[in-house]
Image: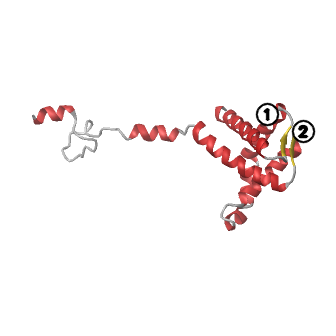
Amino acid sequence: MRNFIIVILINMFALFIVSGIFNGFEISSWQALVVSAIILSLINIYLKPIIKIIMLPVNFLTLGLFTLFINAFLLIIVEDIVKGFYIKNFATAFFGALMLSIIYLIVERFVIVRDQSFYNSSKTKVHYKESLDNENVIDVEGKYEDDKTAED
């Protein structure tokens, strides 16, 4: 649930930025911005994967560039649902979808924390030599303090 709210906030931010950049991409009020972000998030979660699976052969042939057309189509669906959200034409939707994707990727990189990185950083410093008394175990991180005193 926390990540879903973060995704909605990122979509709100991205839609606000894109509406400021493109003249034909207009959001009339902050309520329309919030509703557009929520609907866009829900569509991206539930409808986009289905469309991407159906269009997989075309997406494969275009080396993934057809995804931008899918994103533009989804923006047009949001425009049809939300009053106060207006996109002038398909070209504006296409470049708006491109800009939304770029903004989303940049913001997501810094906002949403990946749990996997925490696990990787904590598992790298495990000392296997402490649990095994075998002399054939290689200590990659260097010698321990008690090994240094035993050698002196």
Quadrant of the image occupied by residue 81: top right
- Name the kind of residue labelled 1 in the image: Val
Residue beneath disc 1: 34
Residue 107: x and y, percent?
63, 40
SS for callout 2:
loop
Dot 2 amino acid type: Lys
Q: Which mark is residue 83?
A: 2
Comparing 29 with 3, the one in front is 29
**Residue 110 lies in what quarter of the image?**
top right
Which of these two is toward me, 125 or 24?
24
Which x, y percent locates residue 138?
A: 24, 46
Residue 137 lies left or right of residue 6; in this view the side is left
Q: Position of residue 149 (x, y in %)?
A: 14, 31
| 15 sits left or right of 133 in the view | right
Image x and y of residue 119, in percent: 46, 39
Residue drawn at x 35%, y 38% is: 125
